[in-house]
Image (cartoon, rainbow, N blue to C red):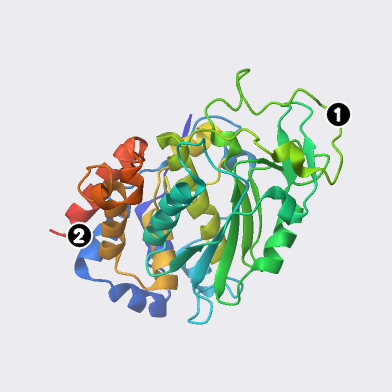
Amino acid sequence: MKVIKHSEEVLKAALISKDPQLVKLYEKFEPKEKLLLAEAFRPDSVLFKPITLHSESDWISSHPEPTQDFAQFYRDPCRNTPAPQKSRIYIQPIGSFGDSRVSTDVYMKWLKDYCEAFYYGLTVRILGPVPVSHTGCAFRVNEYTHNLQIHAGNLLNYLKKKKPKDAFCIVGITMIDLYPKESWNFVFGQASLTEGMGIFSFARYDSDFYSANYKGKLKTTKKLPPADYSVFDGYYTPEITSILLLRSCKTLTHEIGHIFGLHHCQWFQCVMQGSNHLEEADQRPLDLCPICLRKLQSALGFSIMDRYKALQRWMEEEANGTQAQHSNEARLGLQKPVEAFKESYTWIFKCLDVLQK
């Protein structure tokens, strides 16, 4: 086990910068916002903690990357910033989501509302779900897991054609496993950052995926006919549990963060940390560290307090029953499963406590 701990001097340079122009921008934060961001420099901070590497298979150990401080992000000519004419995030569901109890529409609404709170100030739109056959993508049966997989690159080509003119980005999500090319076993997702597109699968976030009991296994391992998409009719999709929703929210916001130009975080425990495997992804928190938060705030211009309040409301809605009683989900007995968000809710409450002192 190894802890990555930076000095106060290094962290101040990464967050505030030594560039006089960027220091002036930092001084525009409200005093209480600066008080929260300054938690980054407190060695005993309970809000922002150093990264702990648990094994050589963790992302930072196996993928050496340069760090990205605020100045590098701000000066990057290739980073994407929403403009008035291109200010919407579009989410394209591909295939079905969840068992019959939770419909695709309900699950998409939960993701949409969370994404709007995380990227506070932007509008998120859910496009109508499309069956796999509409994408024209290649597919196969994985020779090791015996589950269906669809071709990530083909799906990016499909999304490129569907990207609305007012889109900051378009993100495809699916509960079907992905592969990028024949020689690869699988991929969690794939993106084209320059074109503002990404495709991500939540299939492996099902707690049973790696077990012998996984219901998505097919009996045949033979090559399937390339144009016969009937194999996807009634294909197994996992139940939308609280932990699956938590993992989905993490992945969606992490990958869209890359489209903004945020690199993998190596400063603190942060949702922008890279992850090689599910255990590592589960260890990273739901939200941003101070350095990544400043990067996103510079792109969107939100009030830090308003953003945290929006995230808090998302976790409170339908969990306490007060706002759920009038919603369609509640009438169907489909309250948002937020049990797995308890730790994140407590953390946001502590952040707001600092901002509201």
- Mark 2, residue position: 355
Q: Is residue 273 left or right of residue 137?
A: left
Q: How crowded is mark 1: few (under 14 residues within 10 Å), some or many (20 or more)?
A: few
Which is nearer the N-term, disc 1 or disc 2?
A: 1
The secondary structure type at the circle numbered 1 is loop
- Mark 1, residue position: 222
Q: At 39% across and 53% down in the image, what residue appears?
A: 289
Extreme-front residue of the structure: 331
What is the three-letter code of the residue carrying label 2? Leu
Residue 23 placement: quadrant: bottom left
Percent coordinates x, y for residue 306 in the rendering: 27, 64
Classify the position of the C terminus by image quarter. Answer: bottom left
Q: At 82% across and 43% down in the image, what residue appears?
A: 228
What is the three-letter code of the residue carrying label 1? Lys
Residue 310 placement: quadrant: bottom left
The circle on residue 91 is none
